[in-house]
Image (cartoon, rainbow, N blue to C red):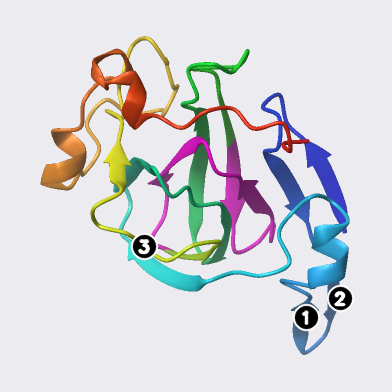
Amino acid sequence: MIVTRTDLPGVLLVEPRVFSEARGWLLEAWNAPRYAAEGMPLEFAQDNVSRSVPGVLRGLHFQHPVGQGKLVSVLEGEIYDVAVDVRPDSPTFRRWVGVVLSGENHRQLWIPEGFAHGFLARKTSVVTYKMTTLYDPNGQRGVLWCDEDIGIEWGTTSPLLSDKDARAPKLRDIPRETLPTAKLNHM
């Protein structure tokens, strides 16, 4: 596998090795020792799968006070996947990275605790998430997808949103004590 460090500390783009042949392909989507060697956790607590039609934007989501890391991949379709640093004491606070994940490129994005996550479905997409902690509805937090202080270039101005995502606050309006803090263990 090829692992590329992004401009955000700890956020990694993973390109698993794909074995293609006439019958199709095979890839190793998770291998604890190999991924741990790159700084990802050995264990995950929950796996989720979502299906989204083109134009759906999910996010930007994070959990606090119990953080949640996510390994995101696409089984079918294509998304523009985004991570945003929401740790106010981080030198990369408010910065974001975006990558295209698809069923064809087989890429994965590792998003550690302390980062908000969201994606825009470019095609009908089936997305998988391996998460380091269980979903906690009391700890669920969100940031408005179009927060101009962050300035994500989604490629759309009118995505399909859930009511909760459409009403999410801007990052500057979220009380600091409800945001995560920077940790020294991010790579």
Which quadrant, please, contains the C terminus? top right
Residue 46: assigned label: none
Left or right of 180, for residue 13: right
Examine the rendered structure and indicate whether residue 43 appears above or below residue 159: below
Q: Secondary structure at mark 1?
A: strand
Q: Give the x, y percent position of residue 45.
A: 53, 71
Q: Are marks 1 and 2 in contact (CB under 8 Å)?
A: yes
Q: Which residue is mark 1?
A: 26
Residue 135: assigned label: 3
Is residue 123 located in the magenta-colored stretch of the structure?
A: yes
Examine the rendered structure and indicate whether residue 48 appears above or below residue 57: below
Which quadrant, please, contains the N terminus? bottom right
> Could you tell me how far apart the alpha carbons at marks 3 and 1 are, in whole angstroms?
30 Å
Of pointers 2 and 3, the one earlier in the residue sequence: 2
Q: Secondary structure at mark 3?
A: loop
Task: Give the amino acid type for the residue marked by disc 2 in the picture.
Answer: Phe
> Could you tell me how far apart the alpha carbons at marks 1 and 2 are, in whole angstroms?
5 Å
Q: Which residue is mark 2?
A: 19
Task: Give the amino acid type for the residue marked by disc 3 in the picture.
Answer: Tyr
Q: Give, as a single range, the part of the protein colored magenta.
A: 99-125
> Could you tell me how far apart the alpha carbons at marks 2 and 3 are, in whole angstroms?
33 Å
Of pointers 3 and 1, the one earlier in the residue sequence: 1
Q: Give the x, y percent position of residue 169.
A: 21, 25
Query: What's the residue at 44%, 22% (across, down)?
Result: 152
Left or right of 3, for residue 134: left
Q: Foreground: 22 or 79?
A: 79
Examine the rendered structure and indicate whether residue 127 appears above or below residue 57: below
